[in-house]
Amino acid sequence: MASTSIRAALAADPDVGAGNVLHKLIEHGAPLDGPGMTFDTSVDGFPAWQGLTLGELYERAAARAAWLHAAGIRRRDPVAIYVSSAADCFLNWMGLTWLGAIPALMNPNIAGEIAAEYIRKLRSVALLTDAEHRERLAGHDVGVTVHDVAETGTGDPAKAPAPFRHHADDPIAITHSSGTTRMPTAVVHSHASLFHATRKIRLSGPRAQGTERILSALPAPHAAGIMTINHALSNRSELLFLSRQNDGAAVLDAIERWQPTGVFGFAVTWAELARFDLEQHEMDSVSLWFNTGDCAHEPHIRHLVNAGSRNVVTRDGVRRVKGSHFVDGLGSTEMGHSAFHITHRNDTERYGRCVGVPHVFADVALLDTATGKEVPVGEVGHFGLKSPTLAPGYWNDHVNTYRNRLNGYYLTGDLMFRDAEGYYYHVDRAVDSVDLGDGNWLYTAMSEEKILRAIPEVRDCTVVSVRTDDGLVVSDVLLSMHAGADPEADHTEAVRAALTPAAAATLRKVVVFPDEDIVVGPTGKVRKFLMRQRHLAEMANA
């Protein structure tokens, strides 16, 4: 059956959801020799970088379903997955959802002590882990049976039970906040919620340019990772999922080696790629960059859209031209999918942390949390969302599930404003903003955007603001410079000029961070937090 017919069949099937795309593809006649997934590590005898067909992917998931079932895993059993490779993460996720179990995907960078406590809080029945993480957990009681993930692929696919039939509300995964900055918050995703956007905007029209061959630099144990798999499978796209996402050189090497048409990542990925002169690398295959999580900064976007190439329709037919698309969005684990969308090219100009307009499924409001009312156009408010994509809540945590709700909206923790044309702009995370009094605020994310735009030598930056014992706010700006920039140059006045007068009045010093001191986290929020913590510790010890 043609891929267009498969996509239409999936879109029309009300039983398709995030937990059964693999099974439904085969049910609707997708060829078994069509695309499945490619990994950057070897798995089950398949070499790294060798793609698994749909049939092979199904068989590898079946093997794990058989092994896990023999190990006593049943429907509704929460099972933690704490592994390094994308292959181990996703193949076991597929095996567990096959059984109707609830996979809890864990960030591989979590420290052993935090991981052990998180697993206990999940009240999981088992842990699937690898040798690296078993060693990290040494001395910590996780309170559950521990299975070696290397064994799960040895099951007999023929002995896999019949696939569990998911209801729309059934949980198909638990993911979490990064866990590298604090105890992770476990977020539940349902069969329907994590597939709604794929059904409504990915399968409703022609396959988008750049999604024919996708390289994912998203963290594997993340809601965005699951959505990317279902997006690629549903659209019959080729997909390479990297296990290492934080190393810009590794991502760039993968692009040159695998020649994707689209690259998916978080904002931190684009900041890392800004280290490199893309003109010196083979990038012509890339026509799409897709961003979610934090919205991206203008200089990082412009760096990417000037690379690659894309098809354009002219009166003389379709032509390939230099320059790519960058689709930006603002999303979080709880949101389930970006609520907004905007597309940048090398000839577009709507920046300033503009995240675009809402998707058709997103009911968006910018709220005054004191009154619960919407703020006027141009005024900053707390971003509230009603959407079928929203996670149902937090696992074993009703307090946080309801604390972040207001007037029926989920409060994402983001501060935004809307212009008269209906475009939305992100200024900061609420926890990072600082009230300077007299109606003035210091918005760290928007300040960083302004600094990056004003000083071309700066590759990335972080604003650290603290309130002193006497109530004064002081700010330090941490700069990461492009290669070749003068490390001794004083950028203080240029930084001061880029900030609002109220924010500039808080400026204490500007610090250049050498590349070897830059903290690289799985998301931009993590990196910002860790760099701030390191700098604050240095200030305290000074």
Image (cartoon, rainbow, N blue to C red):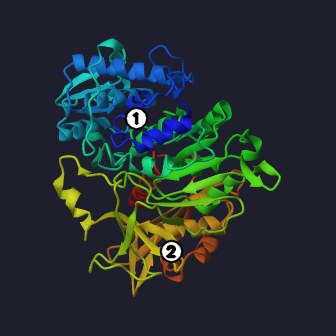
Camera-side residue of 275 and 87: 87
What residue is shown at x 33% (from left), y 12% (from top)?
A: 158
Residue 184 x %, y % = 29, 47
Horizontally, residue 419 falls left or right of residue 351, namely left
Q: Identify residue type, mark 2.
A: Gly
Horizontally, residue 253 falls left or right of residue 407, namely right
Position of residue 183 relative to residue 148, above or below, is below
What residue is shown at x 60% (from left), y 49% (from top)?
A: 289
Q: Is mark 2 in CB contact (under 8 Å) with mark 1? A: no
Q: Which is in the foreground here, disc 2 or disc 1?
A: 1
Residue 370 x %, y % = 27, 79
Q: Which mark is residue 21?
A: 1
Q: Which mark is residue 496?
A: none
Residue 479 x %, y % = 57, 59
Horizontally, residue 503 falls left or right of residue 169, namely right
What residue is shown at x 64% (from left), y 51% (from top)?
A: 274
Q: Is residue 519 visible?
A: no
Camera-side residue of 20 and 516: 20
Position of residue 442 relative to residue 173, above or below, is below
Mark 2 element type: loop
Mark 1 element type: helix
Q: CA distance from mark 2 to mark 1?
A: 35 Å
Label whose residue precedes the other's in the sequence (2 or 1): 1
Q: Identify residue type, mark 1.
A: Val
Question: Toward which corner of the image does residue 493 lie, by quadrant?
Answer: bottom right
What residue is shown at x 20% (from left), y 32% (from top)?
A: 77
Question: Toward which corner of the image does residue 80 lie, by quadrant?
Answer: top left
Camera-side residue of 510 and 433: 433
Using a 10 Å C-alpha cutoff, classify the residue at mark 2 as few (fewer than 14 neighbours), some (14 to 19) or many (20 or more): few
Image quadrant in which the C terminus is located: bottom left
Position of residue 330 relative to residue 69, above or below, is below
Q: Which mark is residue 422?
A: 2
